[in-house]
Image (cartoon, rainbow, N blue to C red):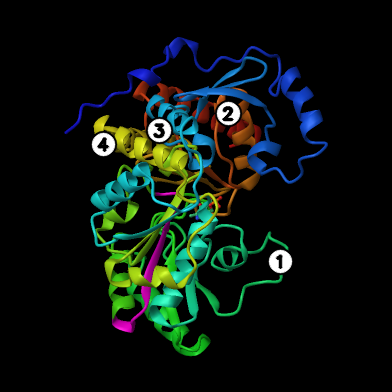
Amino acid sequence: MPMTSLSWATVDLATVPHIVTDAVPGPNSQAYNARGMRHMIGYSSQVTLCPVVFEKGHGVTLTDVDGNVYIDFSSGIYVTTLGHCHPRVSEAVAKHANTLMNCHDFNTPIKVELLEKLAAIQPWDLTGMQLYDSGTTAVEAGLRVCRAATGRQEFISCFMDFHGKSGHAVSCGMINSTNGPGRAQGFYMVPRPYPYRPMFTKADGAIDTDAYLAFYDEFINCATTGNIAAFVLEPIQGWAGSIIPPDDFFPKLRKFCDDRGILLMVDEVLTSMGRTGKYFCMEHWDTRPDVVTVGKGFGNGFPVTGMLVSERYKDSINKISASTSYGGNPMACAAALASIEAMEQEGLLEHALRLGDYFMARMRAMQEAHPIIGEVRGVGCLLGIELVKDRTTKEPFAEAGKLVYQRAFQKGLAWVPAGHILRMSPPIVMELEIAAKGMDIIEESITEVEREYGY
Ligand SMILES: Cc1ncc(COP(=O)(O)O)c(C=O)c1O
């Protein structure tokens, strides 16, 4: 096993976080925002709820334009999994920025090395590949491959999944805020097991995975033409709040698909490349997908994504006009290869799992102490805390979620808001002491908010 090496990202515990302005955002952030927001429209709630302006990042910290230093529990938005400006990644990108930036989809030595590395680290038969520059484009390509491979047209995806914001990606996910024409023809959604809020349970109250599959069977018979190309879903639902299915779900869904000639397309844009302590989240359930998408942490901040297709269907990639302008450019390939090599050689997957154990233990202790915490969950560094008004009714507590997000940010924790579910995606190079400090800030903020609401 490689020795864990976090030395480049080490920070002095006494120096983080460090808030030097009377209020957050400070005056320089406010001045930049006044200029930027005159033109850039449509910021995410991550920004609008705490509009600081960042200037630099190093490892597990971010610094804003007022000199405030934050512990990073966001990795951007699940992107900089190996920390900001990992030296291997930055050097690899800089080298290729000075050598060759783009030559369409011609092979380059660095691209060939990356493809071979990907083929070596995937544990199944996913040897057909294409490279892209956003998760959305990779998802769109995956859908086209599923259609080409099966000759079928329809897709089933799951409630609360998120797959991107283009027409078909949106059609596989939650669509209610996109102001579009609605779901594209042939795209259907079904509920998936959400252990904290199960739709189908056994007599003893335990989640009933078989009942979900029976429902899918009925749904396909009654609501579709039966012409299903693929089930398309996230392994753990990231955007929805780190929702982890029961262990029997994916193995059973694999068999369900096999029995019906349906492909299993797993969107690992958010969950792959170290986020859950594995290269692919599906490794946790030892379940082989037919098509997988990767992104976000893949290039640790450099926009590079990909689609991996089973050996048996890979010729279908020829039928989808697969290439793009930026996909697989040398800088992108260098960033992705350097990120994988860092994980391999610096023991980072093992460290992500160690961190995950720490986070789960700490979150369980917090759950004991705080009545507004309904559930805590996580795998590796993909974590969620679900806030409720009442543990019996499980009524979501979105007002508290927003306040806790803002309070913690103002105390020096950069992270990810999501209504009543607090989402955390710290870089996997974080030392345990810093992780503990970040959790202290969250707990302090929850305590304050509980007090304000009279709990
Ligand atoms: C599971 C999943 N798929 C696809 C996407 C879209 O990726 P991108 O924003 O890079 O287009 C996201 C983005 O959050 C995601 O979480």
Looking at the image, residue 409 sits to the left or right of residue 130; the answer is right
What's the amino acid at mark 3?
Leu
Residue 113, located in which quarter of the rendered image?
top left
Q: Kindly tell me whether mark 3's CB lies below 8 Å from ligand 1.
A: no
State the mark number for residue 344.
4
Quarter of the rendering occupied by the C terminus: top right
Q: Pointer 3 and pointer 4: residues touching (CB < 8 Å)? A: no
Please name the residue that numbered disc 2 is placed on.
Answer: 408
Between marks 1 and 2 in the image, the one whose residue lies nearer the viewer: 1
Q: Position of residue 390 (x, y in %)?
A: 55, 49
Q: Quadrant of the N terminus?
A: top left
Amino acid type, residue under disc 4 in the picture: Glu
Residue 154 visible in the displayed image: yes
Mark closest to the chain's N terminus, 1 or 2: 1
Between 284 and 433, which is closer to the camera in this rendering? 284
Measuring from the top left, give residue 287's x and y in whole percent: 27, 62
Circles 2 and 4: CB atoms closer than 8 Å: no
Image location (x, y in percent) of residue 24: 68, 22
Neighbour tally class for label 3: few under 14, some 14-19, many 20 plus, Cα within 10 Å: many
The answer to whether residue 197 is above or below residue 157 is above
Q: Nearer the viewer, mark 2 or mark 4?
A: 4
Residue 180, disc: 1
Closest to the camera, between mark 1 and mark 4, is: 4
Which badge, 2 or 4, is on the more N-terminal residue?
Answer: 4
Cα distance in 3D space between marks 1 and 4: 42 Å
Q: Secondary structure at mark 4?
A: helix
Residue 23 higher or lower than 134, as above or below? above
From the image, tell me which residue sits under label 3.
82
